[in-house]
Image (cartoon, rainbow, N blue to C red):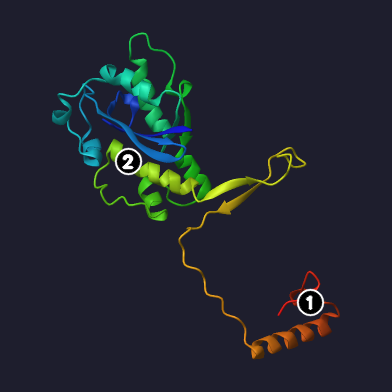
């Protein structure tokens, strides 16, 4: 399973106002493991950058003056993401800008979603943590992902951080099929979530009850049995008394 965690930086917030992409950052996951393979590109948008956007990402027009236009890097970008599952935080924002850039290409047609599947981690986070803040920084705090280098937004750095957040949000648990046929009475797969614990954790100490504690426990169970008029479940397991 190949996934591409993707982020962009732009000249402003609204693609409808003609704002454009100035940076793309992608990191690759294969079978939920970072491969070290990535795609990173600065892009000359051939338009001014809003001051508010510069304050967020720190990228200026002077810095981008010698960078290629999107049309020069489009083929390499599409080759990198082709057929993968895109993992994006607030996907409509990035997809809106990417599709706008693709539609500017001569002879271009279609959208990025027609080439890739998309997972929106913001939607995922809102489902898992309703009513809470689910920005990337908030998720880093919640899942203990180090974002100390994130003084300014950057597409590649944010993609790397998002990859860690995504793995933390979706990791540590796995689905286990329970029924022999793989389906329950409603035709839906029955699953149980299993928490993966560290394999190198210390063995927990076993502290056995003293004879005095055992006798007190036995007396308490007998008192409960006398009140309820029945057998106390805590006293037995498979027909044998537990002490």
Front residue of 113/134: it is 113
Residue at x 48% of width, y 35% of height: 119
Q: Position of residue 97 (x, y in %)?
A: 35, 26
Instruction: Answer left or right for 84 relative to 18.
Output: right
Disc 1 residue crowd, few under 14, some 14–19, many 20+, Cα 10 Å: some
Front residue of 46/24: it is 24
Residue at x 42% of width, y 47% of height: 134
Q: Position of residue 153 (x, y in %)?
A: 27, 41
Quarter of the view holding residue 45: top left
Asked if residue 6 is positioned above or below residue 236 in the image, the reply reads above
Quarter of the view holding residue 157: top left
Disc 2 residue crowd, few under 14, some 14–19, many 20+, Cα 10 Å: many
Residue at x 20% of width, y 39% of height: 58
Q: Which residue corresponds to mark 1?
A: 232
Residue at x 33% of width, y 15% of height: 104
Instruction: Answer left or right for 157 relative to 165.
Output: left
The quadrant of the image that shows the C terminus is: bottom right
Q: Are marks 2 and 1 in contact (CB under 8 Å)?
A: no
Q: Position of residue 176 (x, y in %)?
A: 62, 46
Instruction: Answer left or right for 130 relative to 74.
Output: right
Q: Which residue corresponds to mark 2?
A: 158
Question: Most extreme residue toward the top, as rendered?
Answer: 107
**Residue at disc 2, secondary structure:** helix
Front residue of 14/225: it is 225
**Residue at disc 1, secondary structure:** loop
Residue 32 in sight from this viewpoint: yes
Residue 130 in sight from this viewpoint: no
Q: How far is disc 2 from disc 1 in space, using C-alphas?
A: 57 Å
Q: Position of residue 92 (x, y in %)?
A: 43, 31
**Sequence-first tag of 2 and 1:** 2
């Amino acid at each position: 399973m190949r996934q591409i965690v993707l982020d962009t930086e732009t000249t402003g917030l609204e693609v409808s106002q003609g704002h454009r992409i100035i940076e793309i950052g992608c990191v690759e996951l294969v079978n939920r493991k970072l491969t070290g393979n990535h795609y990173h590109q600065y892009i000359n948008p051939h338009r001014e950058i809003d001051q508010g956007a510069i304050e967020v990402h720190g990228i200026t027009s002077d810095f981008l003056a010698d960078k290629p236009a999107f049309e020069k890097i489009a083929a390499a970008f599409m080759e990198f993401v082709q057929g993968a599952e895109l993992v994006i935080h607030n996907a409509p924002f990035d997809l809106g800008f990417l599709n706008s850039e693709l539609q500017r290409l001569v002879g271009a047609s279609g959208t990025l979603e027609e080439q890739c599947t998309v997972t929106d981690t913001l939607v995922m986070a809102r489902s898992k943590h309703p009513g809470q803040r689910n920005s990337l920084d908030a998720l880093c705090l919640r899942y203990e992902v180090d974002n100390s280098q994130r003084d300014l937004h950057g597409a590649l750095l944010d993609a790397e951080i998002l990859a860690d957040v995504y793995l933390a949000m979706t990791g540590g648990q796995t689905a286990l099929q329970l029924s022999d046929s793989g389906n329950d009475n409603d035709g839906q797969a029955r699953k149980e979530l299993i928490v993966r614990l560290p394999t190198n954790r210390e063995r927990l100490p076993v502290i056995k009850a003293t004879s005095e504690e055992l006798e007190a426990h036995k007396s308490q169970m007998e008192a409960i049995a006398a009140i309820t008029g029945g057998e106390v479940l805590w006293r037995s397991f498979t027909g044998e008394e537990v002490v």
